Amino acid sequence: MITQEKIIKFFSFGLDEKTDPLIHTRILINNIFSSLGIIFFLLFAIIALTNREMLVFWLLTITAILTILNMIYLVRTNSIQNSAIFLLMLMSVLLLSLIITGGTGAT
């Protein structure tokens, strides 16, 4: 059975209890948002690939890779400020590019 503590521990990526609770919460939210983003980026990239939308496929795939690298950076440095800024910039660029290209099937 999955409990709340197991979910928090999974998305905390090994942070110890000595971490400030505010920073721990920010890292937790950043990791959950990034993990869900990676899942959806890869899912929609597969859909774009099946629809032969290569530009959208590469945009989503590169965004997923950069999000994974951002999570690795966060785990190694615990620099939540830099990681959050990078994640917001990445999502903004992706949103603008999907608006410009029209996404899959110009939806």
Image (cartoon, rainbow, N blue to C red):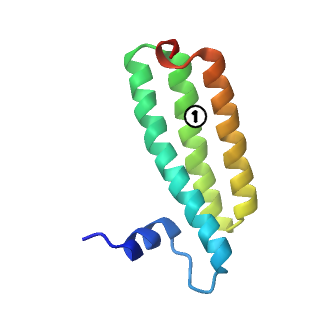
103 relative to 23 in the view: left or right: left
Residue 50 coordinates in the image, percent (x, y): 37, 18
The residue shown at (56%, 76%) is: 15
Which residue is found at the position 46% from the left and 71% from the top?
8
Q: Is residue 75 left or right of residue 77?
A: left
Residue at the extreme left of the image, as rendered: 1
Q: Residue at x 45, y 73 (%)?
A: 9
Question: 10 Å neighbourhood of mark 1: few (<14), some, or many (≥20)?
Answer: some
Element type where label 1 sits in the image = helix
Above or below, 69 against 3 in this view is: above
Q: Which of 66 and 81 is in front in this view?
A: 81
Within the image, what quadrant is residue 51 found in? top left
Type of residue at label 1? Ile
Vertical placement of 78 versus 34: above or below? below
Quadrant position of residue 43: top left
Q: Mark 1 points at which residue?
A: 62
